[in-house]
Image (cartoon, helix red, strand yellow):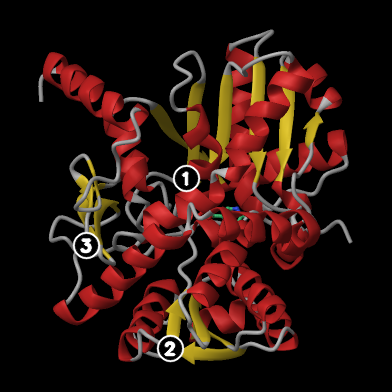
């Protein structure tokens, strides 16, 4: 595409995004998104879409969700001024503290919202997938809270790598099913959860964990996570005196970042930057920098950008952070990149670990390694834009990452 054509297309796509036209009636975000699934799955997705249309904006449902968010999740989460990082970076740095939400990350916003929806739809049980286990733990907690039995599918390899989260789920009353087929990690777990759901879509509810998968999931999860950006925007006006110059969030499947960015999309003066996992380097297989290094294709029911080889085979990914280690990304991010509204870049494993160490020391906050990628990108930007005001989404806390940190930052120090 010539640059002039690309700029024209970007302007048109952005106009529609700002107007709230996406997803359209076919579940598309411009050229991306949609519903690439077997015929057997379509009725279940259509039922879900109708249920969302009926309940998501219903005042009674909204009141019930708000009550759970304020009395159980701990919302609104605070906006913290990071005084020491501000001095070090030469910018005003503000942190949106999703690490202080119940279960330690933003994932609970989605889990409790969908679990409430499941109840309204008359479901008798929840099924979910999990990779690193964080979404599984959020689902287990939300299901327990609402009295719904929960089954979580988890790749057999992940069960071993993330044993503490398997234990947490079991304590919360969830059945954890190790998946031994396929790649034995997140992709196989998603396939298995979908199969369970489709075999009984009336009594079972499939609680998907990020803004990925077929329509209407990317829309539903965006709506439930946008509470992050709505709160942060109001808090910036109150506490910082106005809009930030730039907003940073890490991007795995893309739920904490879309939740943070979406309420700022119409604020054209605010730069939005998504930071992916650069892993060990830019070669295929060494990273999970999907938007930075990938190409268009279909993965798990949606047309988006993904990491694939020249024959369209999905590639293994690598990241020091389990939560970013996924070869796909939500279709709305692909749109926001095409519309030139969000910049996507990546931070390497060692850059993320260095940012995590700096935030511990400077602010007394142990970040999740996923989150540390956003800090690495923010630090780079601050150094190039002295005196600017920066907002970073702290997607989660790092206690879960202690086994990895023992083997990296703490190696030889204990
Ligand atoms: C799961 C997770 C992520 C990545 O998921 P997104 O859908 O991209 O937000 C990021 N940070 C933390 C702390 C997580 O647990």
Q: What numbered label is drawn on residue 35?
A: 3
Q: Residues within 10 Å of mark 2 (few under 14, many from 20)?
A: some
Q: Quadrant of ligand 1?
A: bottom right
Residue 80 lies left or right of residue 48; in this view the side is: right
Residue under pointer 1: 278
Which badge, 3 or 2, comes first in the chain's sequence? 3
In percent of width and height, residue 74 lies at 78, 54
Identify which residue is drawn at 36% across, 48% down: 290
In contact (CB < 8 Å): disc 3 and disc 1: no
In percent of width and height, residue 399 lies at 78, 61
Identify which residue is drawn at 64% across, 54% down: 106
Q: Is residue 375 above or below residue 112?
A: above
Identify which residue is drawn at 51% across, 88% down: 124
Q: Is residue 163 above or below residue 101?
A: below
Regarding residue 286, the answer to whether it shows in the image is: no
Quadrant where the C terminus lies? Answer: bottom right
Residue 274 lies left or right of residue 145; in this view the side is: left
**Alpha carbon separation for disc pair 3 and 1:** 29 Å
Residue under pointer 2: 203
Quadrant where the N terminus lies? Answer: top left
Identify which residue is drawn at 15% across, 55% down: 310
In percent of width and height, residue 247 lies at 57, 28
Residue 264 lies left or right of residue 413; in this view the side is: left
Nearer mark to the viewer, of 1 and 2: 2
Q: Residues within 10 Å of mark 1 (few under 14, many from 20)?
A: many
At numbered mark 2, what does the secondary structure look like: helix, strand or loop? Answer: loop
At numbered mark 3, what does the secondary structure look like: helix, strand or loop? Answer: loop
Regarding residue 43, the answer to whether it shows in the image is: yes
Which badge, 1 or 2, comes first in the chain's sequence? 2
Q: Is residue 269 above or below residue 412?
A: above
In contact (CB < 8 Å): disc 3 and disc 2: no
């Amino acid at each position: 595409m010539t640059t002039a054509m690309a700029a024209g297309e970007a302007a048109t796509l952005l106009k529609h995004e700002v107007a709230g036209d996406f997803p359209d009636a076919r579940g598309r975000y411009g050229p991306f998104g949609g519903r690439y699934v077997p015929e057997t799955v379509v009725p279940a997705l259509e039922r879900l879409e109708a249920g969302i249309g009926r309940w998501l904006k219903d005042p009674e449902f909204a009141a019930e969700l708000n009550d759970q968010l304020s009395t159980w999740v701990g919302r609104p989460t605070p906006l913290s001024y990071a005084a020491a990082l501000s001095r070090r970076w030469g910018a005003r740095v503000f942190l949106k503290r999703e690490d202080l939400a119940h279960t330690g990350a933003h994932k609970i916003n989605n889990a409790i919202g969908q679990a409430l929806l499941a109840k309204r739809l008359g479901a008798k049980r929840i099924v979910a997938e999990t990779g690193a286990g964080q979404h599984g733990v959020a689902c287990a907690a939300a299901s327990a809270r609402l009295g719904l039995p929960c089954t979580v599918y988890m790749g057999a390899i992940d069960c071993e790598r993330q044993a503490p989260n398997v234990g947490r789920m079991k304590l919360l009353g969830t059945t954890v099913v190790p998946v031994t087929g396929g790649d034995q990690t997140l992709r196989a777990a998603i396939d298995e959860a979908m199969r369970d759901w489709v075999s009984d879509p009336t009594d079972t509810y499939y609680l998907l964990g990020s803004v990925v998968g077929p329509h209407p999931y990317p829309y539903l999860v965006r709506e439930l996570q946008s509470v992050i950006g709505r709160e942060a925007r109001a808090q910036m006006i109150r506490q910082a005196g106005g809009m930030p110059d730039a907003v940073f969030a890490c991007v795995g499947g893309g739920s904490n970042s879309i939740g943070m960015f979406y309420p700022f999309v119409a604020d054209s003066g605010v730069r939005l930057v998504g930071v992916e996992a650069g892993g060990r380097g830019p070669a295929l297989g060494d990273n999970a920098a999907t938007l930075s290094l990938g190409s268009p294709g279909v993965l798990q029911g949606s047309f988006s950008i993904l990491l694939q080889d020249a024959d369209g085979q999905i590639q293994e990914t690598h990241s020091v952070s389990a939560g970013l280690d996924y070869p796909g990304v939500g279709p709305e991010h692909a749109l926001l990149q095409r519309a030139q509204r969000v910049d996507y870049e990546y931070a390497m494993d060692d850059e993320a670990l260095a940012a995590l160490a700096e935030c511990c020391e400077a602010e007394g906050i142990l970040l999740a390694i996923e989150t540390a990628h956003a800090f690495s990108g923010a630090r780079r930007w601050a150094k190039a834009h002295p005196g600017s005001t920066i907002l970073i989404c702290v997607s989660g806390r790092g206690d879960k990452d202690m086994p990895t940190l023992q083997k990296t930052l703490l190696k030889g120090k204990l």
